Amino acid sequence: MDENNLFAFVLMPFDSRFDDIYRFGIKEPAGQMGILAERVDE
């Protein structure tokens, strides 16, 4: 990742109930906008 890329650190509960919300509601849409989104458990 170079200094011009956008990065989003996602804070949310570590619970499998939230995995789809993270993957399909945050990570994928962010990626489509050129933003790297990560959770601390990745």
Image (cartoon, helix red, strand yellow):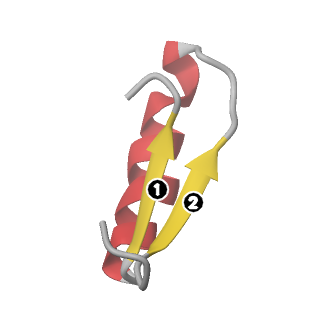
Query: Who's the residue at 58% across and 14% down the image?
Result: 15
How far apart in space, not on screen, are marks 2 and 1 (Cα)? 5 Å
Query: Who's the residue at 51% across and 57% down the image?
Result: 26
**Quick one: 32 or 37, which is closer to the camera?**
37
Where, by quadrant of the figure, is residue 12 drawn?
A: top right
Identify the residue position indicated by label 1 in the image: 37
Quadrant of the drawing holding the N terminus? bottom left
The image shows residue 24 at horizontal and vertical percentages of 40, 53
Near mark 2 (Cα within 10 A), the count class, few <14, some 14-19 or many ≥20, is few
Quadrant of the drawing holding the C terminus? top left
Residue type marked 1: Ala
Answer whether labels 2 and 1 touch (C-beta < 8 Å). yes
Q: Is residue 12 above or below residue 33?
A: above
With 27 as the anchor, is 26 left or right in this view?
right
| Residue at the extreme front of the image, as rendered | 3
With 40 as the anchor, is 24 left or right in this view?
left
* Disc ID at residue 9: none
